[in-house]
Image (tube, rainbow, N blue to C red):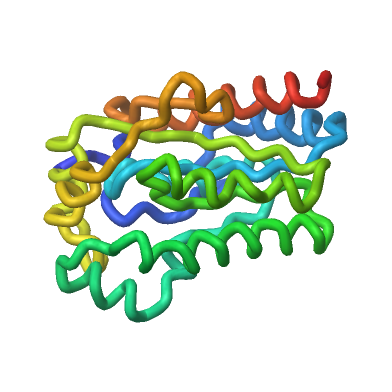
Amino acid sequence: MGSANASTVGPNPKPITTATMTHASHVSNTTAQNSNAATKHHHIWLVTGPAGCGKSTVAAHLSEALGFPYLEGDEYHPKANIDKMASGVPLTDSDRWDWLTVLREASLKKLAEGADGVVLTCSALKRKYRDVIRVAPYYSHDVILHFVYLHAPEDVLIQRVGARKGHYMGASMVHSQFSILEPPTAEETDVISIDVSSTMEEVQREALDKVLQKMDEDAQS
């Protein structure tokens, strides 16, 4: 991801550890755990957006702060999908349906196993892709699903992805994803939107603050 320094959304992000969290993040973590204890719901937080937006980094931060298991959506792609993307061939809708269903079922399985919530990453570029995951609460009525939509200008994300090493998602795929991207509309009220053009510290803080606020609202409903 370009020549970004350690404070920005960097290439091929790694999960955040407690050793790298700031004092402010530690305070947010305590607040998150208290919020979890108060809620009567189970949550699926789907971190979404095109390649290069920092989904993995933000999701790992939310997972640690909230104490929820983290599912990396890319790890659930079948080999055929990965081979296509590595060759610069965009995935079709038919390539995605089974993958999206698997992600939904994997999230529900984690909740059934006792997790209070799940943090999931998935590009979910189109409204109909997001709608596949939105079916989850129909299977379990105490489940609430929200999206954390990460976005930035296309040229920013192309620069960031172009600097990644050893990742199958090439810079050309960013343009391909933007060509089919359907940003969430105002009527998609289950979406939190965050501009990731700022530093990673700011993005993480905003994401966690908005997630905690929404969970508090859900707990009162």
Residue 7 on image: x %, y %? 32, 35
Return the residue nearer the eye: 156 or 49.
Answer: 49
- Taking the spot 39% from the left edge, 35% from the top edge, the residue there is 150
Q: Nearer the viewer, residue 61 or 153?
A: 153
Place of residue 53 in the rendered image (x, y in percent of width and height, measured from the top left): 32, 41
| Count of picture labels | 0
Image quarter (top left, top right, bottom left or bottom right) of the C terminus: top right
> Residue 69, how many percent across, how many down?
66, 55
Can residue 66 be seen in this snapshot? yes
Q: Is residue 16 found left or right of 117 in the rendered image? A: left
The image shows residue 81, relative to residue 209, as above or below, that is below
Q: Residue at x 26, y 31 (%)?
A: 152
Left or right for 143, reference 136: right
122 horizontally vs 7: left or right = right
Quarter-of-image position of residue 40 = top right
Q: Is residue 54 visible?
A: no
Q: Residue at x 15, y 47 (%)?
A: 175
Identify whether 178 is placed above or below 90.
above
In depth, the one of 220 and 210 nearer the eye is 220
Pinpoint residue 78: horizontal percent, then vertical percent: 42, 76
Q: Residue at x 12, y 55 (%)?
A: 172
Q: Residue furthest bottom?
A: 79
